[in-house]
Amino acid sequence: ETGVTQTPRHLVMGMTNKKSLKCEQHLGHNAMYWYKQSAKKPLELMFVYSLEERVENNSVPSRFSPECPNSSHLFLHLHTLQPEDSALYLCASSQEGGRADEQYFGPGTRLTVT
Amino acid sequence: GNSVTQMEGPVTLSEEAFLTINCTYTATGYPSLFWYVQYPGEGLQLLLKATKADDKGSNKGFEATYRKETTSFHLEKGSVQVSDSAVYFCALSQFSSGSARQLTFGSGTQLTVLP
């Protein structure tokens, strides 16, 4: 595997389900991110894990819960979602502390909440 | 706070036409600037970047110049191809809290190139 991978690529869940999105980066980076991409809206940064520090967007509802067990893996735990949470969820990684500051994105998980 | 404003789409061009997608930004200090591209069904790919004023980023025939005086980073390509059809995002990167950089994105511009 190379780059940033995400599983599953597609997910359909009911509002009472609990599911998790997984992201893995194979680039040796030390920061990982979750973004939400909804139709006709700018990309929204949800969570950042950088050098062991978690930074979050305070507007993200508590039904989204991130977990970063190590620098290569990132999860987004979902529970009691709403239909408006249907979107493409993108994971990204970057190398913080160096000259390069670009982020590398995975292919995304297309989530549909029914 | 930081913000990025980019040209409203969609943009439809014929093959070999000249492309410009405008992007302006608001930020304190000296952010890095990026263009990302998203092909259908895929995530975002970095297209090009510039880290300081007057830098020109270029890749795959696309170019953008970091203009601090006009706070702009317009994307250009001299001759577009059908395969360039995608959504293009302008973004800036700046340190936020602690050591984390955060990307601020524009709303994206859908480009369709017709044969």
Image (cartoon, coloured by chain):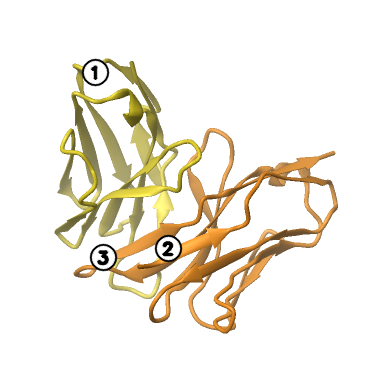
| Residue located at (33% from left, 23% from top) | A83
Q: Which residue is mark 1?
A: A15
Between tags 2 and 1, which lies in front?
1
Q: Quadrant of residue A50?
A: bottom left
A77 on left or right of A13:
left
Q: CA distance from mark 2 to mark 1?
A: 35 Å
| Residue located at (14% from left, 59% from top) | A52
| Residue located at (55% from left, 50% from top) | B108
Q: Which residue is mark 3?
A: B100
Amino acid at dot 3: Ala
User: Do callouts 3 and 2 point to residues on the same chain?
Assistant: no
Q: Chain of mark 1?
A: A
A109 on left or right of A67:
right
Amino acid at dot 2: Glu
Amino acid at dot 1: Met
Q: CA distance from mark 1 to mark 3?
A: 33 Å
Residue A111 lies, in percent from the top left, at: 36, 26
| Structural crowding at the residue carrying mark 3, measured as other residues with C-alpha within 10 Å and reported as few (<14), some (14–19) or many (≥20) | many
Q: Chain of mark 3?
A: B
Q: Quadrant of the N terminus of chain A?
A: top left
| Structural crowding at the residue carrying mark 1, measured as other residues with C-alpha within 10 Å and reported as few (<14), some (14–19) or many (≥20) | some
Q: Which mark is residue B11?
A: none
A65 on left or right of B34:
left
User: Do callouts 2 and 1 point to residues on the same chain?
Assistant: yes
Q: Is residue B104 above or below residue A35?
A: below
Q: Secondary structure at mark 2?
A: loop
| Structural crowding at the residue carrying mark 2, measured as other residues with C-alpha within 10 Å and reported as few (<14), some (14–19) or many (≥20) | many
Q: Secondary structure at mark 3?
A: loop
The letter of the orange chain is B
